Amino acid sequence: MRIMVWHVHGSWTTSFVQGGHDYLVPLTPDRGPDGRGRARTYPWPDNVHEVPYDRLAAEHVDLVVYQRPHEIELAGEWLGRDVPGVYVEHNTPAGDVPKTRHPLADRADIPLVHVTHFNDLFWDSGRAPTHVIEHGVVDPGHLYTGELARAGVVVNEPVRRWRVAGTDLLPTFAAAAPLDVFGMKVTGLPATLGLADDMAAFEDLPQREMHAELARRRVYLHPYRWTSLGLSLIEAMMLGMPVVAMATTEAVEAVPPEAGVISTKLPTLVRALETFATDPELAAQAGKAARSAALARYDVRRFLADWERLLGEIVPDRAAGS
């Protein structure tokens, strides 16, 4: 197939484009949110092609993958014709959560794919035909050394996402173990939190470099209060890192007891972080269990097989092998 998909979520797209189709990624002159083109920090294969938005109408497109509501209108404008589509919902509902109705809830013509069962449970999806395709992650390898008695944290825009990402909790965790924060717009975070001596920031490293650096840290801290399921959590588990995470949203399904500690009790999480940071053998043992659990549930081959089945239902005449 020739699949049009916006570069919205770099980690998710990295897995999605492993499927062997041709992927057309819109490009705008400013490389803004509606036209970022190919990723610069993720290793995407050669079958991902960035296409200027004003040339998309001349391209053959079998399917459009939507990830934001306004993309449906954009696709109509840029392609100039109707093309089958599927909508991927990456996020948990916001606002008055029990009453949050999905933007596609009144449409029955576009399949809605939730990336976690938590999302499927909490969104009011209305009439939309829904599916759950859990995350899949390209295995980075068991890179864990844990040589640094520090905790790794991966978060994008920690200041803007403050309580959602648990940024306000980082000073409490830093009292148990020094923190190294990786992600976008993390520069200056140690000074903002008054943690210049107990935190270092690593701004938007290429994925492979980030994985190698993250794996040198003793333990992975996932302080998010409200997120669908951070792919960075799964990646850290595949690296072989023990996990300390909030027992919220889908994390309770992703992290088994032997892989780390998940809890809604902050003192429990702080103690766990300190324990892993000071006990290399325990940390390594839990990290091995984390890797096994992540590989069993979030293998990219299972993810791609699930997607291939759904794509075959949406565009049966273009399904693999037809």
Image (cartoon, helix red, strand yellow):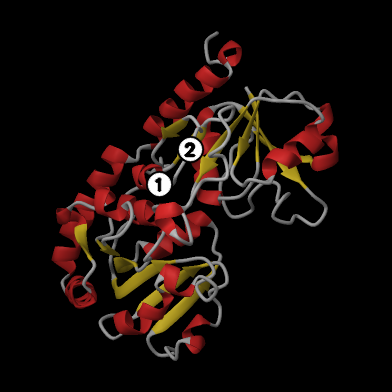
Of tags 1 and 2, which is closer to the observer?
Answer: 2
Mark 1 falls on what kind of element?
helix
In the displayed structure, would residue 116 be above or below residue 65? below
Residue 67, image x, y percentages? 59, 44
Nearest to N terminus: mark 1 or mark 2:
1
Task: Give the x, y percent position of residue 273.
Answer: 23, 73
- Note whether residue 191 is visible: yes
Residue 79, picture quadrant: top right
Q: Is residue 135 above or below residue 1?
A: below
Question: Circle 1 is placed at which residue position?
Answer: 119
Relative height, residue 196 to residue 248 (above, below)? below
Label 2 secondary element: loop
The residue at 16%/74% (across/down) is: 275
Give the amino acid at mark 2: Gly
Left or right of 317 in this view: 207? left
| In the image: residue 306, left or right of residue 105 | left
The residue indicated by pointer 2 is 126
Q: Is residue 92 visible?
A: no
Marks 1 and 2, Cα distance to the nearest angstrom? 13 Å
Mark 2 Cα within 10 Å, few/some/many (few <14, many 20+)? some
Q: How many numbered callouts?
A: 2
Q: At 36% across and 84% down in the image, what residue appears?
A: 171
Residue 91, image x, y percentages: 48, 52
Q: Quadrant of residue 248?
A: bottom left
